[in-house]
Amino acid sequence: MEKSCTLVVHFDKGTPALANEIKEALEGNDVAAKIDALKKAIMLLLNGETIPQLFITIIRYVLPSEDHTVQKLLLLYLEIIDKTDSRGKVLPEMILICQNLRNNLQHPNEYIRGVTLRFLCRLNESEIIEPLIPSILSNLEHRHPFVRRNAVLAVMSVFKLPQGEQLLDSAPEIVDKFLSTEQDPSSKRNAFLMLFSCAQDRAINYLFSNIDRIIDWGEQLQMVVLELIRKVCRSNKGEKGKYIKIIIALLNAPSTAVIYECASTLVSLSSAPTAIRAAASTYCQLLLSQSDNNVKLIVLDRLNELKSSNRDIMVEMVMDVLRALSTPNLDIRRKTLDIALELITPRNIDEVVMMLKKEVVKTQSGEHEKNGEYRQMLVQAIHTCAIKFPEVASTVVHLLMDFLGDSNVASAMDVVVFVREIIETNPKLRISIITRLLDTFYQIRAARVCSCALWIIGEYCLSLSEVESGIATIKQCLDGTYATQSAALETAMSPPTLVQGSLSSIGNLRSLILSGDFFLGAVVACTLTKLVLRLEEVQTSKAEVNKATTQALLIIVSMLQLGQSSILPHPIDNDSYDRIVLCIRLLCNTGDEIRKIWLQSCRQSFVKMLADKQRRETEEIKAKAQISNAQPDDLIDFYHLKSRKGMSQLELEDEVQDDLKRATGEFTKDADDANKLNRILQLTGFSDPVYAEAYVTVHHYDIVLDVTVINRTKETLQNLCLELATMGDLKLVERPQNYTLAPESSKQIKANIKVSSTETGVIFGNIVYETSSNVLERTVIVLNDIHIDIMDYISPASCADVAFRTMWAEFEWENKVAVNTVLQDERDFLNHIIKSTNMKCLTPPSALEGDCGFLAANLYAKSVFGEDALVNVSIEKQADGKLSGYIRIRSKTQGIALSLGDKITLKQKGTA
Amino acid sequence: QVVLAASIVSKSGKVLVSRQFVDMSRIRIEGLLAAFPKLVGTGKQHTYIETENVRYVYQPMEALYLLLVTNKQSNILEDLTTLRLLSKLVPEYSYSLEEEDICQHAFELIFAFDEVISLGHKENVTIAQVKQYCEMESHEEKLHKLVMQSKINETKDVMKRKASEIDKSKIEKNRGDKGGFGPLQSMGSGKIENSFSDLSISSSGTGFGSGSGFGLSSDVDSFSTKSKGRPTSSATAPPKGLGMKLGKSQRTNQFLESLKAEGEVILEDVQPKLGVSQAAALPPSDPITLTVEEKLNVTLKQDGGISNFDVQGTLSLQILDKEDGHIQVQVQTGENQAILFKTHPNMNKELFANENILGLKDLNRPFPTGQAGGSEGVGLLRWRMQSNDESMVPLTINCWPSSSGNETYVSIEYEASSMFDLRNVVISVPLPALREAPSVRQIDGEWRYDSRNSFLEWSILLIDNSNRSGSMEFVVPQAESSAFFPISVRFTATDTFSDLKVTNIIPLKGGNPPKHSQRTQLITENYQVV
């Protein structure tokens, strides 16, 4: 176990204090100077200097000081100095501080006593503590609660030491007695904590003998009681009933912290529906009553956990959960919706959708700036509901269609996508949706929404009247687009502000096209073509059809003309031009083959897309279910054999204990030993006088180098020192130490390196030593560089397409790598890149299918430091079978872009 | 539910202070704190971050983050309360929320953090409590020091007695031996000195080593010369046994009284600077305690004259034992006509007007007893005096700031009226914000500079006939003269304006009058020069 570190203070390297200056000040009589010097000494110690010569000075000149600040700083100093030698034995000079500590423990100033007792809590050396024990115990009876409170903690810490039970075997008894008479709530808590962790039976006894007063106990004590209950029930399930009563009583405690704790205790103790229900409703109450966003979010996390473990009970609570939507915070709303959406059932769907609808209506009236985003969330939520339960679609689709003209494009886009899906899956709603869409079409302001709406109109206007009004609507919206020279000039002179700013309803489509959006123009042309083709089928009068055809042709041609006129800054692009021309050809020369493609194939591929999406979703769910399957050597809990009311003991214990261990970093997954050996790096040559090799363990935020150093000579090497230096965002934590290495012996040296961001770092260094024959000359052996791999820090992650695009636009660093590979197949290459960069492909596999000679995919990963790494691969198969194209890496920091680029350049060749 | 660490990091990611409450390695905590600024997103409306292993709960403070690192099971509600408390504490210990200031006060912050979280568990404390804990002002320690001092004085006393005995015997011896006087005296004193230092060592066996500062020969020397001028009878002062049954303070007071009776100026040694109020707070030990207290509210004008002069007096009675409740109090008032007395509504007004006796209207009712009425006891009589007469003011202050070059010279003088002897006089002069302590050129008394609140305290332990006026002068960088006002003054005195005295206690149920003690003091409540 590494030495524990109790405090960190920023150390300004610019003005290092000199040991002898400190010494001088410590010896002087000026208290202020003494304080200053002591602070400097502590900072030096924290920075890795050992300054052993100061110890005696401090003993002689600082120990007797009567100043309180000096005494407190002295305790800090004693807290951080090494009190043991290299073999773990207490240094003999430490006995010198004992007397001072004892005096402090009998000091008339109660605060000096208190802080000294607190210091003892952090002391691990029983040799130092032993003579102090009587003084510690006598402080339990001190008049001032400040002293008693810390005295109890000191007793606890002493008792918890490895030899604690010998040092203070009567401690539980003493504390038990103390607890029975103590009045100060904090001292009581500490005493109970001591019993709880050292003598559980006594704690339980105390609890039960005071059970009727428990509600009046202080908040702190109640918390420990709950902790105790959790611990006891884990080992002693039979008595759970008794404790659950206490928890229920504490649910009425005045402190919300206690209530929260009660709920989580309940959950951990029992999976009985009543308990879960009580916990869930407590959480819901907290969710409503607490105004702090952090609390709300964490409570939602708890509810989410409950949801995955006890879905059937949470289903009942869905409306309570949804009430959290009243907060303006979007994160909370999103989380709430996420939870609620997984809780919908046929029984509560109506209620939920009703609530969501109400919320949607609310966003219309409020002037809140985030309303657009919130509405988008709600639309998506309703969308999900409607997919799961198609019957609700009819109740919401019309309401949502009001938002097609929403100024928030994303929200309008969601609505239109929703409508498109519903109209296909709910044929019954087709007529009403189409009517509504045609009515509200003029309100649509965004080009993307517009093109999607046009597609719906083109596909789903079936009857004669629908087709006719479809054509009429488009014509109306384009009214005036007959691109006669004058019209074009007229609009060209009016500034383009009209396009963005104007809310004027008529001619929205027109202004969009006039602003140069020819893609939309092509969509309009296609829609018109489709409608005319359909009209041919449903209209019996040939004359009418011809009339419509010519009208459509006029519009289409006008658009083409506009595209070629000089008044727009950009002429029409080739793709749109081709498309529009194709439409003209079609309208002039229709045929069955063409008609089939235009009227049926489109729809078919859309249906296929929907089906594909559905399939993907079910697959994902399946995959998820797969993950939670047991490993071959996992413990199997037989549900029917298990006591119904609780989780198994193993489950619980692991859960609680690991949490703290993981947090303090004590707990690390045992790495694969074989894997470890793969990482061995040879640092020096076999013929060097010192052979060194290292294996590198990469934890999250740190790297540990385990260096084995072997003296290959027949001489003793003195002052051997492993000097390391780093490049990149790496930092050495400790200063190197000097060793003496006997002939042909070896030594393990550990070095810790702190990592603060994701980039490839390099560690290089020397081994320096002196030989006994030649003391004056230091020999230097240069080590091989150690490269720290970026791959250790990034892990595949996924994000929404929209988020990816926003980040792509936002990030400042781009690294563009030209594709250069021997691989011949696009997909092989992509997989190779994915594998070698440890990223996740966001582009769905269905979009990568087929052989067209082109491939574009987005990859995404996240670093442990929370940084995003984005990669876009765009490749084309050349005529000669080679792949060409670019891989672009974007990130917020230069480090990732560079290191990832290097990595790709290195690996992309892909030789077999 | 454990807080792993409380830390302050700058927005750029520099760790300024961090205090860990559970065992964790340096690399671990540094790693956690280094990762934190990268994880903090912008524009979020919540202030916690969860990673795989830990949760950070934080609060932005200007260019800094104050954060708690907790495990993920930790109780968020409690952690937020802790965080809030810490965030209020940080500005208490660091003047600004700049990196430099935080670094400078890192240790103070660590001490404060320690008071809020112990072994990772939250303590139920308020800001005021934390401040109190960190200041470490201990009443008990003061008492302890007082006792120590009294022990020292006691030994001195013993020493003195021994000295005069030896002196006497020497003189007698000399008389008996030789007729010559002059040359022998010097010789004798030299010898005495020796024996004194011997004495000091032998009598110090009670526990304070000879190193504790009093047994030095120079000290003893001055003692011995003084004691020479004293009548020998005083040397046989009442013996002081070592039994301390009455309580230490009582004993100390007695001790002081007796020393005072011997004409020794011992104020400086024994009376603590904040002494008077503390002495008053001591519980009364006599069955009946009568307290005469006058509070002064005075506002003097900077350029002379008074704008407000107001004395409010009370006579309060505290009875420990219920049986002593049936009494009346005979008082005697001074000749000051400006004072108007007012009795408590329950008192017999006529009795007081005619005979100066304070008694209850209802003779069957006893006075309330015990500590019920607070430590002050029950008020019997109140009086008030207002005046515009400058000669009534016990202490006038004259402050003359004058600028010359880059500096401002401030001379202050005080003049005390001969009515009172003033004790523990403290004159606090506000100063403009200074980088370093002002340089005091001349002073009668002592001074202290409080850099935190930026004022200079001039303290004179006793103003009596020997120093009715005094002055001090100090220099600061140039400043407006208005910066040195309002000057506030504190002092106490044992005489009052009313000169009210309790002359007798008349028991109503017969018998001997119960023992009573009387305290009289004049204190300043608000005494300012504006």
Image (cartoon, helix red, strand yellow):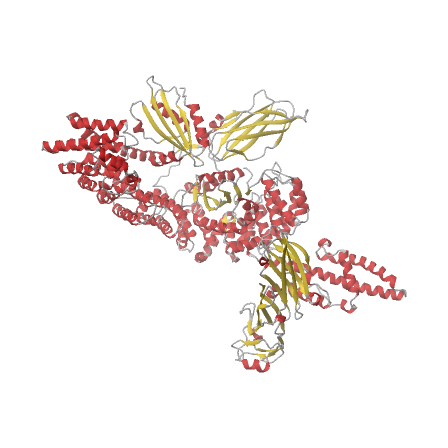
Near-viewer residue (B141 or A10): A10
Q: Residue farthest to the left?
A: A541
Q: Is residue A322 visible?
A: yes
Residue B223, picture quadrant: bottom right
Up/down of A637 relative to A282, above or below: above
x%, y% of residue A79?
59, 44
Up/down of A232 relative to A786, above or below: below
Q: Is residue B18 visible?
A: no
Say which residue appears at 60% left-offset and 33% top-offset.
A737
B332 sits left or right of A582 in the view:
right
Residue A555, picture quadrant: top left
Image quarter hosting the C terminus of chain B? bottom right
A867 sits left or right of A594 in the view:
right
x%, y% of residue A203?
49, 51
x%, y% of residue A658?
45, 40
Up/down of B333 relative to A838, above or below: below
Near-viewer residue (A911 or A112): A911
x%, y% of residue A789?
47, 28
Q: How many marks?
A: 0
Up/down of A651 relative to A274, above or below: above
